[in-house]
Amino acid sequence: MFPEYREQISVLKTQDAHFARLFDRHNELDQQIKNMEAGIVPADELAIEQRKKEKLHLKDQLYVILRKTAGD
């Protein structure tokens, strides 16, 4: 996610607790979705869809923070 911001993400994860929480939650949701889609964790389509929407919302929030701190 956001390879062009790799260095900035590393810095923000250590210096910004809010960013770190959002980033960790995004990764947690990503893993949950993969497990659900692979059938490792039982889930219906609605549960998967809800997690995907939350993950996308988090990604949008992360991007806003990255853009703001990059000065773009």
Image (tube, grey):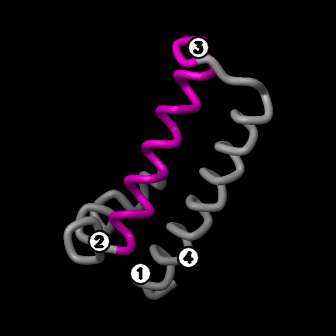
Q: Are marks 2 and 4 in contact (CB under 8 Å)?
A: no
Residue highlighted by disc 3: 38
Q: Nearer the viewer, mark 2 or mark 1?
A: 2
- Image position of 70 with respect to 34: above or below: below
Characterize the local packing of mark 2: few (<14), some (14-19) or many (20 or more) Cα atoms within 10 angstroms. some
Amino acid type, label 3: Ala
Q: Nearer the viewer, mark 2 or mark 3?
A: 3
Marks 4 and 1, Cα distance to the nearest angstrom? 10 Å
Q: Residue at x 57, y 70 (%)?
A: 61
- The mark nearer the N terminus, 2 or 1, is 2
Relative image position of residue 8 (x, y in whole percent): 31, 68
Residue highlighted by disc 1: 70
Marks 1 and 3, Cα distance to the nearest angstrom? 37 Å
Q: Nearer the viewer, mark 4 or mark 1?
A: 4
Range of residues picked out in magenta: 18-41
Closest to the observer: 72 or 65? 65
> What's the magenta bit mostly, secondary-structure-wise?
helix
